[in-house]
Amino acid sequence: MSYYFCIVGTQDQPLFELEFGTSKQGGDGVARFSQEARQMNPFIVHSSLDFVDELQWTNSQMYLKRVDQFASSHVSTFLTPTSTRFMLLHLPHPPNTAPQSTPSPNSFPPFTPYTSTPASTTTAGRSSSSSTTSIPNNPTSPQTEEAIRAFFGEVFEIWMKAIMSPFASVEGKLGSPVFRQRVVAAGKKYL
Amino acid sequence: MPSSPDHKRGRPSEIPEPQPPEHTLRSPRDSPSSSIPEFDTSISPPSFGSKTTLSSSETRLPITPPTSSISKSRSGSGLRKQSRDRSFASSRDTSPSIPLSDSNQECRQTIVRSFAPRVAVYASPDTEEFIRQKGFHGGLYTLLRPYGERLQGRVIIRDSVGSSKGWDDFGVRFINGQELQRSSARQVEGGSTDLETRSLPNGSQSLSEHRNRSRSDDFTTVIDRLLSQQLHTENAIFDSSKGDYFDYGGRSYEPRPAGSPLYPFYLRKLLSSAPIVPYETFSHPVACMITVSSRHPAPIEALRQLYENTCQGFNKTPTWISTEYLRYYVLIHDEENDDITKTTALFDLMKRHFGLHCHLLRLRSSQCVQTDDDSTRVPSSEWLSAEEEIKQIRSRDYTVDIEDSEKYILESDVTAIGALLREMVAQSIVPFMESRIMTWNDQVASRRRGFSGRFMSLSKRWTGFGSSKVAAFGPGGASTASGSNYDVQRGFYPPETPEAIMRQLADYAFLLRDWKLAHSTYDFLRTEFSHDKAWSYHAAVNEMVAITSLLMSQTYNLKYKMEAIDQMLDTAAYSYLTRCSMPSNVVRCFTLAIELLKNRGTLAADDAARLGGKLLDFGILDPVAQAMTSERIADCYMSRASVIVPNAGTRRRQAALWNILSADSWIKLDNPVQARLCLTEASALYRLRDQQIAGPPFLSMQGFWQKLDRALGEAHNAQSLVDTGVGAGHLEYSTIEETEQLSAFTRPVNAEVVDTEGFTSQDASRPHPNASYDTPLQRDSSE
């Protein structure tokens, strides 16, 4: 699976964006979105805010689970008490492998969503062998749901610590490298 | 109505028993050795014997309209045929008419109108010769077709509960009888797809293979070819002077017109191109018109010959088409060469032989040109199937003179044809269908629906109650083993089985716009078909249940109902795709559902959009259809964008996303005009103008946005290059050429946008063209 994680402020502005891949099942923690898919991701996440806005009045939980699906990408959401939204887009695909075939012109969207080589070369690719619990590729399964819940919980904690800094604001961009490192670690731990 | 006096005068109020032909054939032109074709409505389904139509069941109301006269044509035979004199647009009709001309209503009307009874035309050779002289080379049905689509006046239809309703937009579709026989013969050769798919495992792998294999002869691919052809001509005639380069700063924003101009065209083609299949009877003929001209030396003989052609003989229609349709006999009188008194005598004779369903059509034989007095243009046919349209375009391209494409006809001929069609529809076809519905409903449907019917079918199914049980469990004896009427080998129900009849009953009710009866019948058939594992039937019936329930109730407040509809659509899609591999039907089914839902206002539009997403996810849409569907989804969300619904947010952001997606698809299809409209709309939805910001809300959206923007700019430049450079004659050709040159030139910069074959997987290790997009993430992750 490849993940695109985004923290969205109350004015729909992104405060933090991160792409990472799965570290379970021998994954190397590198996102494998194809070029087109990477470009579509923010659009998809932004559009599923519509559903988040609708769900927040009916669902009393902070973790809203899977709110939207676009083609093979799924979007899960965590809603903080200050209406900052954690959006996680997850694209299921087998780890470290290239897609089997080129898509037919009739498939939608008309591109392969993932590739074999990591899209962003800068993220360090270290193979982690800590695949004790495996998250199946099925994004609707309860295991995935639980893993994402744990991930969100940890990020929520990190995020609270980050915004409690007297120099940070809730609506400001989260540029701290420590925060980023911790989110990456959380992703590695749970996803 | 020029010919109706003759007709009225000649109509007997009581016709005696059908007599042997030797006694009745008194015409010197007739050979005495003929047997008169049975008047078709007297053929009753073999299993139900001869029960009268007018049963005393309390659900059936007497079919006599209060103000009309009944003439019983055949009291002696088992079934009675009621011939009512109906009037079009009668003032005494108090029924409500449909609300007209709401823009939202348009698609619904298109859908409703598209389901019209088919009339097969069988013409004698001399008739075809006569018509060809008039300048219609396609034969009689090409002459009649445009007029059949738009009947003048209102048609009054009584539904199963006895209330009558007038419809202004009722029509019939003429099809070529010979072609019907030919096309369906071809399908039979193709074999029953139902059977061969049965053996396939239901894995997705085999599914996609199967899909690819069967795609080539699908009607959606034909539609796609037609549409892309249309797109190119549209691009060629595009007037670039009024569409200046896309900028959201300078120009005032105008809301995009809902849907591309091609969309209604696409919808019509989708609805009119369905092939003739056993599992639904919409494309089966409801009636056939047997035509002979007064030139023929032995007209009665010719008519009889044609009649026999329709029900037996070498080139008969396939066995799954019921032969119990109405036969309508038309005698064409040549006004210029033939004697009217002789023709009238002949017509009287014809009526004596063939009963009431006869008409005398008086036409002039000479070809009409534009300069003649009172000549009118023959309107073009609205419901040409995609295949025919392509053929027509091609022939238009190859013929030298343009005059040939526009046909003219005399005003008097138009009125004569109009009168013929009015009389045929109002006095023969509609009453025929009504009486069929009534009979079937009484004798088949209510029996099956009742308690004993259920008990019988259950006991037949589960216990060895029937007699044919023993043949049982051999391979291929499966159909008899389950006690069903489904013919597994050939993959259809024979037309005389109760299941096939009920399907036809429901379809007739649907054609007569009695949604309620159609819905309940379809709903009942659902379980029957799934028990019999008749998957194509099952899928088709599920589709129709969903569509009728969407058509039926006007108010949208039932949330639970949507779930049921969803489920039925899913079942239909699953059966169509994995069991029968008929992706075109899925496209049709979902597109209809989307349109009907969208028609129901803002709340339902959400569901419509969801269905649209599902349809796209099936991966069966061709590129143009894909672009149009995503645009339609954007439309659905846009209707929600500005509306504040309590307990539900807006759909502004979804609408923006889908506008972007359709803009992308249109650029890939080389249609910058439509793409620009979509992108303008998206920028309005992202509130780019209000906030004075240069880009979309997320910084990482910039890359894609600029890419689209740049592609549009290039397309615009190409357009203006063409406009200044070349003459109008070469416009289309050079537009494509120029764009290709340009795209070849710019390909290293952004290959994904311009390259039409850019569906292949991208090599992501290539340096990214959009630095502005990649910087934030790269910088972030390097930290």
Image (cartoon, grey):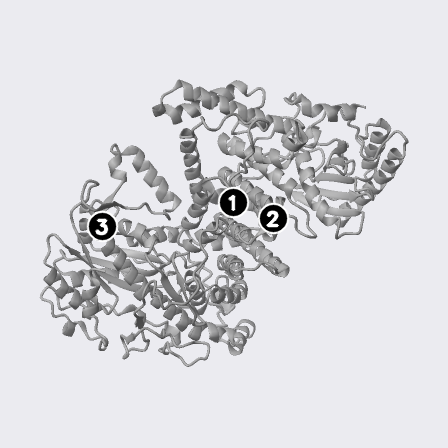
Residue under circle 3? Answer: B411
10 Å crowding of disc 3: few (<14), some (14-19), many (20+): some
Name which residue type carries label 3: Glu
Q: In which quarter of the image is residue B181?
A: bottom left
First in residue order: circle 1 vs circle 2: 1
Q: Quadrant of residue B60?
A: bottom left
Residue under circle 1? Answer: B211
Tell me if residue B34 comes above or below residue A5 in the rendering. Answer: below
The location of residue A24, given as percent across then percent down, is 78, 38
First in residue order: circle 1 vs circle 3: 1
| Residue displayed at 42% across by 42% down | B222
| Residue displayed at 23% across by 56% down | B416
Q: What element carries label 3?
A: helix
Q: Nearer the viewer, residue B493 or B656?
A: B656
First in residue order: circle 3 vs circle 2: 3
Per the rendering, the mark at residue B610 is 2
Tell me if residue B532 comes above or below residue A118 in the rendering. Answer: below
Say whether mark 3 and mark 1 are on the same chain.
yes
10 Å crowding of disc 1: few (<14), some (14-19), many (20+): some
Q: How many numbered markers are drawn?
A: 3
Q: Distance between the residues labelled 3 and 2?
A: 50 Å
The location of residue B127, given as percent across then percent down, is 19, 53
| Residue displayed at 36% across by 68% down | B92
Task: Evaluate whether residue B36 shows in this view.
Answer: no
10 Å crowding of disc 2: few (<14), some (14-19), many (20+): some
Q: Nearer the viewer, residue A48 or A153?
A: A48
Q: What element carries label 2?
A: helix
